[in-house]
Image (tube, rainbow, N blue to C red):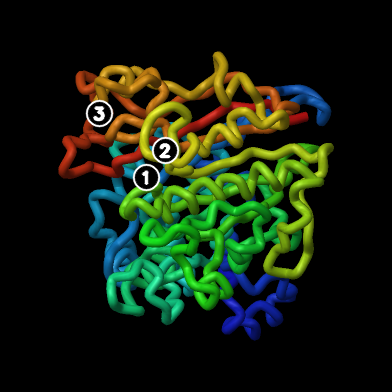
């Protein structure tokens, strides 16, 4: 029997099932236990002390739509070739824990249930079906109106005037899927944290003046830092708890000389850099009113489309280096021999003047922007980017030609780790 837990408006069904109201910012959907078929658990044979081997992935699947409810309609009818290709990519890589980005937020949970049941739960072109018993769906800042002309286009109700760019509330959202228990009652979200709360924030200057800011005091009193959300979601794997730190910073483009998006992208990435430094994290107050970061003894994995490349592209001050060079981040995965790479990316080489090696790219236009960054204490045994070369049969699943994509203009990025 499948159980679904809705938002606060579904409190009566929660209580009837004996489930406490843990959070007001998520939708939690539970499927049957991990023992059913289709659940990929890589566990060494032996006693309970044997390490648990798991695959963790992030995938900007580009399952976003410009009209609210459109994605839900496509998924519930099953008429979505793109979603079938996305599902097959996931099935071919079979992650145990997956962050799925640019999946439009649906408060009812219907969209995610349909995607799990009709797409992931059904074999795609012979690939093994997958079940994810645990899911977490945080609310998003995208499309939430501010009533202010943030982008100075003369209107106050456009997508650029929302807390995060979006044509409807929740566009470009993200979800977490897992075959291991998500400790949702311990989750932290930073959806409402104001940008001006960050010490020495890169608030954009007005290029038309010598000292003024792009945003007025009224705007800064309302403008949030996260364009979607920043979350810390613990997951229980074997005997260990790992904190999944997930975000999707705004792209550092589509602005002007004030660099408002580039600066925001930098500071959105900085949130997690500060979160890993207990001294720097004192300003980080979550949506429940609790301040501070992640203690030194806690394991973590940073996941998401950070919209920043370490050596190329338009990001401000190469923003992603705040994480890649962080002393708590696993150096081998960040910039060493375990950096996720692919043969397809190596042959893509879209940007001849780039300094970075294209084998490490994760986006069709030729940049490394999607990351799975574990803490130093986690043992990484393998990593990769799902990007077949054009002569491989599975190349049909990416098929990006600069105009259209069979699935997404991003690639799924994964790592394998052993957890005691």
Mark 3 burial class by Cα count in 10 Å: few <14, some 14-19, many 20+: some
The residue under the point 72% across, 40% down is: 237
234 or 207: nearer the eye? 207
262 with respect to 379 (left or right): left
- Residue 255 lies, with reference to residue 111, above or below; the image says above
Q: Secondary structure at mark 1?
A: helix
Q: Secondary structure at mark 3?
A: helix
Contact? badges 1 and 2 (CB < 8 Å)? yes
Residue 119, x across and y down, in percent: 36, 51
Q: CA distance from mark 3 to mark 1?
A: 14 Å
Is residue 408 at least partly visible in the picture? Answer: yes
Numbered mark located on residue 91 in the image? 2
228 lies left or right of 400? right
| For residue 202, above or below residue 197 | above
> Whole-Å distance between the Cαs marked 1 and 2?
6 Å
Q: Which mark's residue is nearer the viewer, 3 or 1?
A: 3
Q: Quadrant of the N terminus?
A: bottom right
Front one among 276 and 18: 276
Residue 134 appears in view: no
* Residue carrying label 3: 395
In this orientation, which residue lies closer to the viewer: 195 or 284? 195
Residue under label 1: 87
75 lies left or right of 144: left
Residue 311 position by quadrant: top left
The alpha-carbon separation of the residues under discs 2 and 3 comes to 15 Å
Quadrant showing the C terminus: top right
Question: Disc 2 on helix, strand or loop?
Answer: helix
Q: Residue at x 76, y 42 (%)?
A: 277
Q: Residue at x 64, y 32 (%)?
A: 374
């Amino acid at each position: 029997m499948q159980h679904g837990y809705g938002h606060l408006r579904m409190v009566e069904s929660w209580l009837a099932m004996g489930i406490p109201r843990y959070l007001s910012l998520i939708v939690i959907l539970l499927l049957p236990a991990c023992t059913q078929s289709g659940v990929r658990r890589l566990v060494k044979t032996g006693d309970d002390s044997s390490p648990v081997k798991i695959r963790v992935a992030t995938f900007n699947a580009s399952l976003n739509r410009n009209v609210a409810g459109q994605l839900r309609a496509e998924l519930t009818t099953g008429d979505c070739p793109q979603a079938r290709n996305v599902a097959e990519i996931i099935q071919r890589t079979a992650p145990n824990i997956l962050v799925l980005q640019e999946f439009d937020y649906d408060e009812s949970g219907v969209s995610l249930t349909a995607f799990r049941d009709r797409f992931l739960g059904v074999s795609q072109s012979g690939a093994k079906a997958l079940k994810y018993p645990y899911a977490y769906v945080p609310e998003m800042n995208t499309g939430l109106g501010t009533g202010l002309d943030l982008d100075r286009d003369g209107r106050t109700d456009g997508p650029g005037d929302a807390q995060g760019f979006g044509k409807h509330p929740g566009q470009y959202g993200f979800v977490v899927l897992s075959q291991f228990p998500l400790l949702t009652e311990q989750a932290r979200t930073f959806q409402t944290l104001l940008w001006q709360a960050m010490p020495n924030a890169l608030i954009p200057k007005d290029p038309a003046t010598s000292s003024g800011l792009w945003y007025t005091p009224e705007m800064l009193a309302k403008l949030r830092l996260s364009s979607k959300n920043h979350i810390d979601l613990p997951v229980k794997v074997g005997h260990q708890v790992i904190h999944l730190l997930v975000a999707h910073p705004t792209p550092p483009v589509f602005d002007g000389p004030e660099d408002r998006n580039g600066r925001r992208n930098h500071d959105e990435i900085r949130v997690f850099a500060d979160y890993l430094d207990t001294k720097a994290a004192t300003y980080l107050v979550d949506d429940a009113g609790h301040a501070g970061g992640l203690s030194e003894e806690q394991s973590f994995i940073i996941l998401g489309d950070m919209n920043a490349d370490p050596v190329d592209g338009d990001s401000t001050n190469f923003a992603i280096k705040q994480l890649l060079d962080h002393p708590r981040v696993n150096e081998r995965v960040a910039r060493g021999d375990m950096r996720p790479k692919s043969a397809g990316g190596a042959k893509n080489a879209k940007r001849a003047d780039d300094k970075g090696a294209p084998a490490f790219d994760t986006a069709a236009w030729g940049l490394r922007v999607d990351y799975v960054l574990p803490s130093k204490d986690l043992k990484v045994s393998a990593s990769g980017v799902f990007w077949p070369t054009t002569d491989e049969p599975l190349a049909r699943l990416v098929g990006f030609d600069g105009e259209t994509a069979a699935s997404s203009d991003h690639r799924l990025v994964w790592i394998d780790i052993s957890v005691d």
